[in-house]
Amino acid sequence: MKVGLLGFEFVSPNKGCEALSYSFLNILKRAKKSEIEIYVFSNIKSLGMSEKKFPEFKFTIVPLKVKDYRMRTIRAFMDCDCVFDITMGDSFSDIYSKKYCIGLIRYKRIAEFFAKKYILLPQTYGPFTDKKIECMAMNVIKRADEVYARDPLSKEYLENNCKNVKAKLFIDLAFMLPYEKEKYKMNHEKINLGLNISGLLWRGGFIRGNQFELKFSYKEYINELLNRYCHDNRYNVHLIPHVIDQDNDAYDDDYKILKLLNKKYPNTVLALPFKNPIEAKSYISNMDCFLGGRLHSTIAAFSSGVATIPFSYSRKFEGLYNLFEYQYLIHGRTDSLLLSIEKSINYIENYREITKRVVEYKKVNDIKMDQFVTEIAKVL
């Protein structure tokens, strides 16, 4: 069987995007009924550690942009028994860039037309600010053989805007990412508080200027929390990156911001750059409480049983956590600075109670992921 993967990232500064790739390979491994050859439709040159982690699969990278390879791309799509598309989890939207979204839709249409089956994996759909782009997106979704949403808001959005499409609701695939908690040795004499500080929010978004329309200064919010907890002897404060790009001119990176904050607050613990998402989740799993600005950093915490406080700058957060009726979010687009700080302090101080809730949710998650493996086995 030949399976195509579209919208996956195997080597990326963003460990959340990598997490989706590793997680889906794990699902394919569990669901496969025969030998699988995987075509990765991407302009990457390396598959990272995926070939080592999943030796049962044969991988082929199929470039997408270079004109000389255009016919090769189409032939590869035609060879595929099915193409699974995840759009990096949250990029089936024009909020990051209209041009970028149109480019993604172009390849979705090609895959849908030439592959024997085209499957949209659990992801966020929308929002779309441009009606023309929204119409293009709906045409792709209508023609897909299967459509899965990762949150109730996305499912509701499809039901309202894409008639006759019966989207199935499952959870984000990164909940199935494996981890090795024992890989990192922590001092548990104090409360380990993990902070994933988003370099994207710190800089004001991809285009700067408060792109995500937060109600307050993210920098001020973070500094308030660090000032409070770095001087509280009950806590070890860990600065944990989840997007790591060592280039000096990187437009999206957490690590360089964390290095500066580590100098400003020298009693914090700066986590070293992670090589892959499994390392990131393994580190995060050792926290007692975790507050994160990157969605998949919070999924890493939540799915490993850690008291989790997501900082929401997009409805993808509310969409995902509403699935569990989980209330411990900071709503950066609607809450005031004072309310956000008060809520954060309250949640951190009551992390033991939140942990009990998270552990119960984790049991439900495990059942849902088993159900999704069964679903993919049917598609294959």
Image: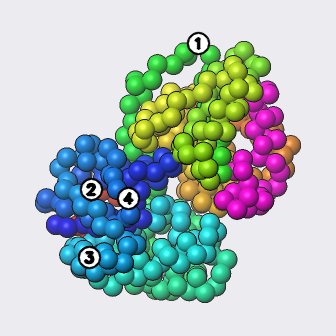
Q: What stretch is highlighted in magenta?
A: 201-228
Residue 72: give its label.
3
CA gap between label 2 and label 4 equals 21 Å
Drawn side of residue 189 relative to residue 365, left or right:
right
Q: Earlier in the sequence, mark 3 or mark 4?
A: 4
In the picture, which quadrant includes the C terminus? bottom left
Tell me where residue 109 appears, x and y as whole percent. 40, 82
Q: Which of marks 2 and 1 is nearer the N terminus?
A: 2
Which marked residue is nearer to the observer: mark 2 or mark 4?
4
Crowd class of label 1 (few under 14; some 14 to 19; many from 20; radius 10 Å): few
Relative to residue 20, is residue 42 depicted above or below? below
State if disc 1 and disc 2 touch (CB < 8 Å).
no
Crowd class of label 2 (few under 14; some 14 to 19; many from 20; radius 10 Å): some
Name the residue that disc number 1 marks.
189
Tell me where residue 38 appears, x and y as whole percent. 24, 61
Name the residue that disc number 2 marks.
28
Q: What element does badge 4 sit on?
A: loop
At a point 66% along the width and 51% down the height, the residue shown is 200
CA gap between label 3 and label 2 equals 25 Å
